[in-house]
Amino acid sequence: MYTVWIHVVAFFQVVVMNCIQPVNWKYCYRVDQWLILDTIEGYEIWTKQKHPYQSEKEYLSNVQGTTPTEKK
C-alpha cells in the first residue's frame, strides 16, 4: 500500500506542481497525449514486459549496427 502512496505523492510533486506554473501550460494541457501513454508504459515496466530505456537501447543498437548483448 505504501508503494501506491509513494507514487501518488511523487506524481503530485512532479507533475501537478510543475503544471500549475503558466510557463509549463503548453506542455501540460494535452493530458491525453502523455498521461495515458506513460501510465501504460509504467505498467509494462512494473510487470516486467518492458525494461526501462528499452526503446532507446534498441535505437542505439540499430544505429551502431550491433545487438544489445554484443560487446566490442
Image (cartoon, rainbow, N blue to C red):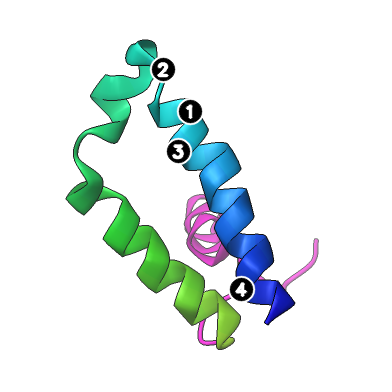
Q: Residue 20, how many percent across, how many down?
A: 40, 25
| C-beta proximity under 8 Å, tags 1 and 3 | yes
User: Tag 3 or tag 4, which sits nearer the N-term?
Assistant: 4
Residue range (magenta): 49-72
Separation of disc 4 and disc 1 at Cα?
21 Å
Separation of disc 3 and disc 2 at Cα?
9 Å
Q: Residue 64, how many percent across, how many down?
A: 57, 52
Q: Nearer the viewer, residue 3 or 36?
A: 3
Kind of residue at disc 3? Val
Q: Compared with residue 12, is residue 67 higher up or lower down, i.e. above or below?
A: below
> Mark 2 highlights which residue?
21
Kind of residue at disc 4? Val
Q: Residue 16: give its label.
A: 3
- Mark 3, other Cα within 10 Å: few <14 / some 14–19 / many ≥20: few
> Mark 4 highlights which residue?
4
User: Tag 1 or tag 4, which sits nearer the N-term?
Assistant: 4
Separation of disc 2 and disc 1 at Cα?
6 Å
> Mark 1 highlights which residue?
18
Residue at image position (58%, 80%) is: 46
Q: Secondary structure at mark 1?
A: helix
Kind of residue at disc 1? Asn
Q: Residue 64: give its label.
A: none
Residue at image position (30%, 33%) is: 28
